[in-house]
Amino acid sequence: MARFERKPVTDIGIDETLKHVDEVKIKKAIDWVLKAEASARLKTFVQTCVRCGMCSGSCHHYISHDNDPTYAPAAKVKQTVWDMLDKNGNVSKEDIKKYARIAFTECNLCRRCVQFCPFGIDIAYLISLVRRICCLIGTVPQYIQDQALSHMQTTNMLWFRQDEWLDTVQWLEDELRVEIKNARIPLGKKDADVLYLAHGLEAKYMTGLLTNMAKIMNVAKIDWTMPDTDGWDYTNKAFYAQDHETMSMVVRRHYENAFNLGVKRIVMGECGHAFRTGIYEGVRFLGWKESPIPYIHGVQFFYELFMEGRIKIAKKIEEPVTVQDPCNIVRYRGMGDMIRYIIRQTCENFIDINPGYEYNYCCSAGGGMVDAGPPWKMARIEGGKVKADQIRDTGAKIVIAPCHTCHKGIEDLNDYYKLGVHVKFLTDVIAETMEIPEELRA
């Protein structure tokens, strides 16, 4: 094993916490997670791995760092989980600092390596155990801690008060009526077909995206509503910290809103991790076998609208476009064909990325890396070099990324590596190209 060498990075969420933690607390956290919380998968995966190295070339961090063996997926496990097991949990503060850096900033939990492991070892699961241990100790990047605390207090990621949410939606409805006659963004409507949950950023910084979604809803004549209480934000940043308790609370609030309003299903926008928490992670920690009400991703919803003829295209985008396959909805949930169908309906010149679908490279921002904030920006930029090269090779001018994290990650790669592309959501593409019936035009 090569020596683990990294540029020093200061993160008060990790560094300051370790000043107030002793080895007794560290061992207690490790023992609890690895002996009480972890499933049989831990023992199976650790004993099955034969160190064959098949996972190495699958990892964008490994490739982007000139095949540095310390970035290989198996090496990340060896330097964290295996190290804890070998030491029986008797590890130092410096060990924890190293574990946190690897788990939060050098692994996106993208599971691309699982596609290449001959035994199907889920390295993302093993790294998530490291994050859980760091969470119980408190050694989590400060920016992730802040967002998880906001979810804990407000059930949204940006400390947005309920009255601010209501005012924002009413303002956006007024703006939408400039284009769509008598447009509505219903709040707290009972017995609607769809409860739509928004991304926290769409209420504060990216309001145009929420407006475009409302535009689609109105043109497609969907019977819909949004929450008029807290619990409107589908993001769940506590997942990145493996804060199971807060993550579960946020998911429960989403379903409670749906039950209270009597809707038929929940539809969320373009986000990967939130969909994962909404239908699997959060549901499991709440003790439910499966989602108690259908929970639909934006890609599935848009695909359905096209298949039912509710959306018609007036003029397709002519510039060459390519696609980013978000890990949590393509590698995990198989929505690659749906995404490409929608793109072909709205774009004239689609250039598929290579490799694509479940073999597409992670954007290098997912799994909480972009949420780790400015101290770790270059870690994801450097780790995403292979992603930048992959996009450049397509020759496309537009990258369609149906995930907020992918969107931001590729924007940063675009700026740093001078790719000369524009990154768009499917929501924006559909709103831009769809036909607005004459009777709906303002």
Image (spheres, rainbow, N blue to C red):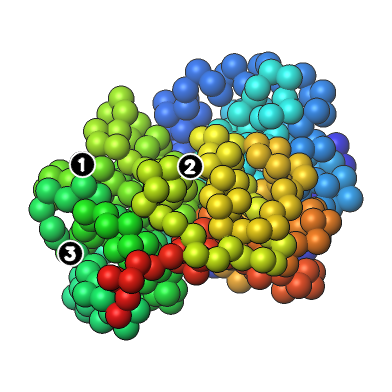
Asked if the residue under mark 1 is in contact with the one under mark 3, i.e. CB atoms within 8 Å, the reply is: no
What kind of residue is marked 1? Answer: Lys
Q: Position of residue 340 (x, y in %)?
A: 60, 46
Q: Closer to us: mark 3 or mark 2?
A: 3
Secondary element type, mark 3: loop
Would you name the residue on which mark 2 appears? 132
Check disc 3 and report the residue beneath it.
187
Label 3, residues with CA under 10 Å away: few <14, some 14-19, many ≥20:
some
Q: Mark 1 points at which residue?
A: 264
Tell me where residue 397 sits by quadrant. Answer: bottom right
The relative height of residue 116 versus residue 274 in the rendered view (above or below) is above
Q: Is residue 167 left or right of residue 80?
A: left
How many angstroms separate mark 3 from mark 2 (CA)?
36 Å
Of the two numbered discs 3 and 1 on the same chain, state the one appearing first in sequence.
Answer: 3
Q: How far apart are marks 1 and 2 (CA)?
A: 34 Å
68 horizontally vs 388: left or right: right
For residue 337, side relative to residue 274 (left or right): right
Front one among 323 and 202: 323
Judged from the image, the secondary structure of the residue bearing numbered disc 2 is helix
Could you tell which of marks 1 and 2 lies nearer the N-terminus?
A: 2
Q: Is residue 291 visible?
A: yes
- Asked whether disc 1 touches disc 2, contact meaning CB atoms under 8 Å apart, the reply is no
Which residue is at a point 65% across and 37% down the rendered structure image? 358
43 shown above or below 79: above
Amino acid at the residue labelled 3:
Leu
Q: In which quadrant of the rendered image does the C terminus lie?
A: bottom left
Question: Which SS class for mark 1?
Answer: loop
Q: What residue type is labelled 2?
A: Arg
